């Protein structure tokens, strides 16, 4: 009769997730993870084919954390489109290593592609409602806003600029409002 594994897949993923939260994705290797779990590396490779598979599962868990925060922000806000941007920046501040893992560096897909079935539709609808834009122009505003907010979040995350939520909110609102007004004029001229 074979022995029952000491660790479940979920426990291994949780251990790896905590390592990434504390020290970044660079901290994940078999030895460090095994040390964190107080075991040899064997249980890791009994449950997973490779460290890449563990990293993939950690990324899914990190996206789920971000998505949950985004869903709460969208439900809780008077201006949900604005709140989605603020939420992104706050995530960069509160979870700097998860933010770097998810949203910086090389990727085969954009956040919007990865997130199409999550909060993307709700954010787009909030954008349409808040600024009176049709889907075409709301998508353009969403993308332009995301590029700006991402840049701002990266600057804050890397401690290049001061972590002043009021200043960031004002910068974001002014930029988004200006772009929305330009797109609204363009949309109205087509009708």
Image (cartoon, grey):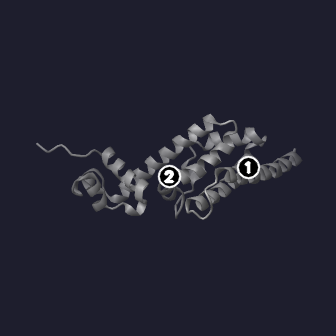
Pick the quarter of the image with the N terminus. top left
- Pinpoint residue 8: horizontal percent, then vertical percent: 28, 44
Say which label, 1 or 2, has the lower sequence index. 2
Q: CA distance from mark 1 to mark 2?
A: 23 Å
Q: Depth check: give the residue in front, 155 or 134.
A: 155
| Dot 2 crowding, Cα within 10 Å, few <14, some 14–19, many 20+ | some
Locate residue 82, reporting x and y percent.
68, 44
- Left or right of residue 27: residue 121: right
Residue 118 at least partly seen: no
Quadrant of the rendered image containing residue 51:
bottom left
- Label placed on residue 173: 1
Which of the pair 141/113 is nearer the observer?
141
Label 1 residue SS: helix
Helix, strand or loop status at disc 2 = loop
Determine the residue positioned at 70% across, 48% down: 139
Horizontal side of 130 relative to 191 (left or right) equals: left
What residue is shown at x 73% (from left), y 44% (from top)? 135
Q: How many marks?
A: 2
Residue 34 position, x and y percent, is 27, 56
Q: Residue at x 40, y 50 (%)?
A: 57
The quadrant holding residue 191 is top right
Residue at the (42%, 60%) spot, across then down: 25
* Numbered circle sitting on residue 95: 2
Instruction: Let me know if residue 97 appears in the view.
Output: yes
Q: Position of residue 93 (x, y in %)?
A: 55, 53
The part of the image, by quadrant, that contains residue 163 is bottom right
30 or 161, nearer to the observer: 161
Graded by Cα atoms within 10 Å as few (under 14), some (14 to 19) or many (20 or more), the crowding at tag 1 reads some
Q: Residue furthest left?
A: 1
Q: Is residue 153 left or right of residue 27?
A: right
């Amino acid at each position: 009769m074979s022995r029952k594994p000491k660790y479940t897949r979920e426990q291994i993923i949780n251990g790896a997730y905590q390592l990434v939260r504390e020290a970044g994705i660079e901290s994940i290797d078999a030895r460090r993870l095994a040390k964190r779990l107080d075991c040899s590396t064997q249980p890791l490779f009994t449950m997973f084919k490779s460290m890449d598979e563990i990293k993939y599962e950690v990324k899914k868990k990190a996206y789920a954390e971000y998505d949950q925060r985004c869903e709460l922000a969208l439900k809780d806000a008077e201006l949900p489109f604005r709140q989605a941007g603020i939420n992104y920046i706050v995530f960069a501040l509160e979870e700097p290593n998860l933010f770097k893992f998810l949203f910086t560096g090389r990727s085969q897909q954009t956040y919007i592609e990865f997130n199409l079935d999550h909060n993307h539709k709700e954010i787009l609808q909030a954008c349409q409602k808040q600024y009176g834009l049709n889907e075409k122009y709301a998508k353009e505003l969403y993308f332009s806003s995301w590029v700006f907010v991402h840049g701002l979040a990266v600057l804050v995350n890397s401690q290049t600029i001061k972590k002043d939520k009021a200043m960031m909110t004002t910068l974001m609102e002014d930029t988004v409002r200006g772009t929305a007004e330009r797109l609204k004029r363009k949309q109205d001229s087509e009708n």
